[in-house]
Amino acid sequence: MRNGAGWRDDLLFTPGPLTTSPSVKQAMLRDLGARDEDFLGVVRSVRCRLLRLAGAEAGDHEAVLMQGCGSMGVEAALGTAVPRAGKLLVVANGAYGRRMADMAKAMDMEYANLEYPENTAADPRDVDSLLSRDQGVTHVAMVHCETTSGLFNPVAAVGKIVRDRGRSFIVDAMSSFGAAAIDLGEWHIDWLVSSANKCIEGVPGFSFVIVNRAALEKCAGNSRSVCLDLYAQSEAMRRDGQFRFTPPTHAILAFHQALLELEAEGGRTGRMIRYRESNAALRGEMRAMGFAEYLAEADRGWIISSYRYPAHPRFDFASFYRLLKDEGFVIYPGKIGDADVFRVGNIGRISVSDILALTAAMRRALQTLGVTGMAENALDRTA
Ligand SMILES: Cc1ncc(COP(=O)(O)O)c(C=O)c1O
């Protein structure tokens, strides 16, 4: 199907950028001045709606918007939260967790690692014993939905330990916020980072951090960066409602529309229901075709799913990808550790019927490649 600009929009089964609604795209067809009241009103509305979505109170928390991709929001949160004399514990079981350690290193921040294989959720008991051993750690950072594989980490249990041990908690909820249940208070999250082009279904251009006001107020002068200083950004937003430097005006207009559409869908819960239905349909279809999941049943999330390449001599991922792309479906390549896998996301403006269209195209692609007997072999393996 061609969109208004004459392009055929692919359906994106990826972790973002995602398929967006026509009205979200339409909202960008407007030029606004960065310092103009029309734009500042949209920014106010976005920040206020984000707090409401997070279940946070305006006096206790703040939604700070930061230009750039999601990783920049994470880097801004780490660099602003952890003081020069502080130490960060990074709990990692995938690329996004490991990226936080890379950031700490690049910022010359003292840090410790608690690393797990990519198919294994973090164990809160390990966090507890590390925090009891290493009194120097002031902050703990972890990813909620580790989009590398799709697993959810036990953020609630880790948050309780971090609070009991008197440390601060930073959570990368990039691919879960807006759809997954997250309780900032109960889970003791001081800094939560997400971005425009994930479960809220906007377009790329900025990230946002929902931060505890009391934690943020202690952070003047912490940042190792001029641009990624969340404290300074928040001061500017509080003072006159403005970004310090050029804002992504069109992406913010799209995001505002995306927030209205999220609210109309029944908020976070409505969105989660759609995503879970799509994920259930995907997993059922993939199983029926004979694809093996990378994660064990108990560890599987519902945002993105990882599948092993079939052990069939005629399966070639590049050709499989290309055949799907030719039909307008984009899946997500990627290796996890030593395992050859590809991923299929089910966030964005897609529904069960889109999933069924994708899996029908996968069946055609497998037939074209001559990959037969997968389902029978999978049954043999589980027999
Ligand atoms: C959990 C998580 N963290 C961080 C990122 C990085 O976001 P970006 O690619 O926008 O920098 C992603 C992207 O998919 C993610 O899923």
Image (cartoon, rainbow, N blue to C red):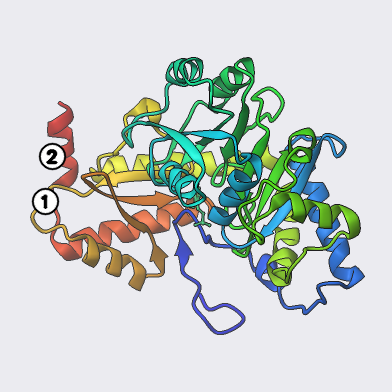
Q: In which quarter of the image is residue 41?
A: bottom right
Residue under the point 57% across and 18% down: 161
Q: Is mark 2 on a helix, strand or loop?
A: helix
Location of mark 1 (residue) = 312
User: The C terminus is located in which quarter?
Assistant: top left
Q: In the figure, 348 relative to 176: above or below? A: below
Res. 261 in view: yes
Q: State the image coordinates of residue 162 (x, y, percent, origin top left).
A: 58, 22
* In the depicted structure, whether residue 92 falls above or below residue 314: above
Res 338 → quadrant: top left
* Residue kind at label 1, given as amino acid type: His
Gap between marks 1 and 2, in whole Å?
Answer: 10 Å
Q: Position of residue 357 (x, y in %)?
A: 41, 58
Q: Is residue 281 left or right of residue 74?
A: left
Within 10 Å of the Cα at label 2, are there few (<14), some (14-19), or many (20+) other Cα atoms?
some
Q: What's the mark number on residue 377? A: 2
Residue 328 lies, with reference to residue 265, above or below; the image says: below
Earlier-in-chain disc, 1 versus 2: 1
Q: In which quarter of the image is residue 97?
A: top left
